[in-house]
Image (spheres, coloured by chain):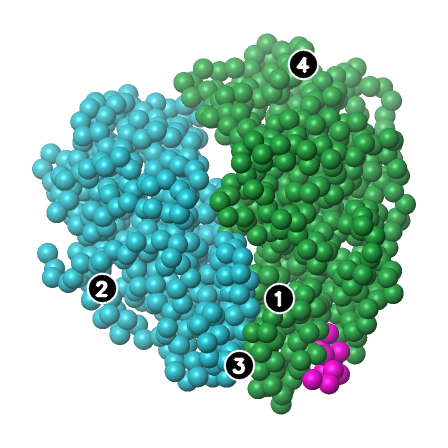
Amino acid sequence: MNKRSTHKSTHGQAASRGRASDCGSSEHSLHRRLFLQGGMASGAASVASFNGLFSIPAAAEQVKRQGKKCILLWLCGAPSQFETWDPKPGTETGGPFGAIPTDLPGVHVSRLMPQCATIMNKLAVIRSMKTKPSEHFQGIDVLTRGDAPRPPFTRPILGSVVAQQLGDLDSPVPQFVLLDPCPEGNEFKAFKSGNWAGWLGAEYGPIRAGGEYSIPNIKRLDSISELDHQDRETLRAFLSRKYENDRKSEAAANHNAAFHRVAGLMSCAPLFDLDKLPEKDRQRYGGGAFAQHALLARHLIENGSTFVMVANGMPWDNHVFQHEMHQMLVPELDNILYQLITDLEDRGLLEDTLVIAMGEFGRTPWLNEARGRDHYPDAWSMAMAGAGIRGGVVHGATDEFGREVIEGHTDNQQLFATIFRALGIESDEEYDLPGLPTFRRVEDGVNPIEEVLL
Amino acid sequence: MRHGTKLIPIAIYFFTVSTLVFAVSTVAAQDSPSTTSLTSEINRQLSNAWKRDSVNPAGPCTDREFVRRVYLDLVGRIPTIGEVDTFLLDARPDKRDHLVDVLLDSEDYVQHFTDVIDTLLMGRADEGKYKQRSSSQWRSFLEDFLRENRPWNEVAAEILLARPDGDSNRGAVWFLYERNDNHQAIAESIAPAFFGVRIECAQCHDHMNADEIKQSDYWGLVAFFNRSKNTKTKRGPRVSESAVGGFSEFADLTGDSYPNLLSFLDRGPVKEERPEAGKDQEDADELYQSAKRKDGTRIPKFSRRSEFVEEVMADNPRLALAMVNRVWAILMGRGIVHPFDEMDSVHPPSHPELLQVLADGFVNSRYNVREVVRWIAKSDAYQLSSMRPNGVDDPATFAWYLERPLTAEQMARATQLIVRGQFQNDDPLIGSFRQQFRDVLPDTFVAPVSDALYMSNHPTLDQYLADSNDAQHLRQKLMQLPDHSQRCDSLFASIFQRSPAETERKAVENYLQQRESHLGQAIDQVIWSMLTSAEFRLNH
């Protein structure tokens, strides 16, 4: 165990929303006062001013002093447990790929995962996931937020909770980043365009990047000076916050939170520039958005992000030609996981960085007529490594055909309690929001899976 | 009269009260036969519900709030300073009703609702596709529908039959044609666009939550359209239809298969002879009507599309329910069923009786969309303050006017009007904004950071402001004014339709004062800061 102080969790209530960061240089603060007349400036979002190049080594040094981090490889569409963590070689449901031994005696994984087979001592695999939703939208909701909707709350998504609990929200580096080839939606737009931060408030929502590996419109136009660019934003924030405060408008709060992030994001644009990373690293992770985004996730975590969710559209939903598709997808995942976990370890970051790889459910033991596997929430697998997680553990089991969980049944609540515990976040914390019934971060007081925790 | 690309003249009087003329161009709207207003019915039902549920609604909005709101909602733009003043000075007790009527008679209503309905039926698209929607006359087909108060049931039938009999409705084919023979995409868009339901989930199995939506509905709807094929003819794009084929089986999750019978929701199956499995039908001439059409396409004697229009769509109550719920959502910020295109058993209406009354009234008005807009816009609930009253937090009560983001088109028109004093519906600003701000009627407004970055750093808006330097443009008019105080008044009147508060005045005046050496740029920056504020971004 390391000896850094545990992060005190702050209750992320409405009261803490709209907190203005205080990181503008004194020069600019003074200048702002000239037209905002002192007291008024407090009503405006202060504008972060970060001159000069973002110093990556210095930031990395700072990161090492900070708390825990998390990378979620979001396998959207839902991968097959049979072709990954829970192979059933030689059975009618097992598929054609067979199983290989791993560095853990007696534990096998799919033949499609030869690299992960060598680092199972670092991984905790849960083979006994059993959840309720069998539809993507509901499944994604439950497995990224931790539970089914409970109106009128919108439960915040995992990344928002972690960013709010563990993140440094005054940092210019975005605390919660979503990387996806189409981060605004396309596949499952209804989910991607939904309210991710929920009741935490829009400032805890993700920064979306990807596709071209950079954030569009991140550079200031030449036609406006840096000072004017900052000052017009200060004026904008002042006028717009007045509207927000006068009306207690949630829509305006969302709008203002988005603008509030612009300056900080602009200052750390180089972080999102993959060209700045060694070519060797880029090759090691492999081509394609998912691999490059995983590398970028490592880079962001190294430089101060708290939660990075790497999604890749939803390629795993193989209702058609499942074996052919998984034959391409699983080896890519195998390599990415291997590179990511060993990289984090080499850099001394694995201890503090939780890596999660999972989708929203599993796939059917049987094939449909299109030789696809359909949705199957009854018995599926996921894997974790790093912060707070005990490596070399396989939790739970399914029957010989993978139809039923026969041991260690784990649902979404237990999984989230485990994730929160691993990150040092209180899973049972209560929330009292004005006018709404009490709820807890994980409902029903369920216990985490001790077996996979340090 | 076609207005797709025509400049609509708007008289702007920045600094004087206008001469009490509504300078919107008007068109002669056909009066629909004996339409009874349902405004009082809306008022009665909502106030009963408030009483029943002990909800204290917000107070009525002010005239100033109303005039901005109603211009945005009915004609897709903010009012000019002259139009605001005209309305405020109007002494008639029924001036709000009067303004609603005036706006609904204008061509701007037609253009705005065409934008909205196009997005709801077709979705956002890249600019190349928008060009096709114009050149195919899809756009003008929708404009005619709204301008001439054509009955929605007839228009819907023309769209799905997609067999134009003349030039006037040849744009009708584009709904199917743009989907490019993707029959599942066609089915998945017909269900929400015309019937107010989403069926995507039912592709692989019966809907998990809404029991009434079956896998057979999904594949049945596909089957009605899977003999259709895009065909280029001398008379333009057409969607031809084969008399044979289109039989398949779909498998459920357990692997059992079923034939894709011609049925959808509670209609059908329509009788049709199915060939034995594995046997091909001959595509014989006698299966087609003998008379060839001018465009060269043939019509099958048994046309699945005709069957759909006659057996599924005709008199289908869902058609009216879906449209009134959608119009309600456009004006009230959310549907009586919410989300407005998920009218299934999982999403019950908040005011079932009201929904039914509106649907019946819509049918009685000969499916006249403009009348539904009128009833709602004149209602008390539409004219409530947008400040949520204490102790009420359920937006489904409609106890306050729900804030909503402007659409890209509303923003682009309003921006032109503010900065240049007039607007064009084909200005490049519209194309730029709609590629960035794609949402229309979002379930919830989540402002993405990418939008803030776009406004902060994309050249579109900055360049537009820099290029607006003529004498009649806002910047030059402000430059001519004697002091910052008047500049500030004019900025707030033009952009926010109100006077500045003292703190606001100080901030803006000081900002300008500090930059007197480059006042033109400073004015642009203030305009930018107002156009990017929440007060402008939202209708309220």
- Pointer 3 with pointer 1, Cβ within 8 A: no
Residue B381 as seen in the image, left or right of residue A370: right
Mark 1 lies on a secondary structure that is: helix
Q: How many marks?
A: 4
Give the residue at mark 1. B531
Residue B270 is marked as: 4
Chain identifier for the cyan-coloured part of the image: A
**Residue A274 to residue A320: above or below:** below
* Mark 3 vs 2, N-terminal side: 3
Circle nearer the viewer, 4 or 3:
3
Q: CA distance from mark 3 to mark 1?
A: 19 Å
Circle nearer the viewer, 2 or 4:
2
Circle nearer the viewer, 3 or 2:
3
Q: CA distance from mark 4 to mark 1?
A: 54 Å
Q: Residue A163 occupies which quadrant of the picture?
A: bottom left
Mark 3 lies on a secondary structure that is: helix
Circle nearer the viewer, 2 or 1:
1
In reply to whether residue A342 is colored magenta, the answer given is: no
- Are callouts 4 and 1 both on one chain? yes
Q: CA distance from mark 3 to mark 2?
A: 37 Å
Give the residue at mark 3. A35
Q: From the top left corner, tell me how far across and down residue A268 is, in percent.
A: 39, 70
Q: From the top left corner, tell me how far across and down residue A368 is, in percent.
A: 41, 23
Q: From which residue to which does the magenta span run?
A: B474-483
Chain identifier for the green-coloured part of the image: B
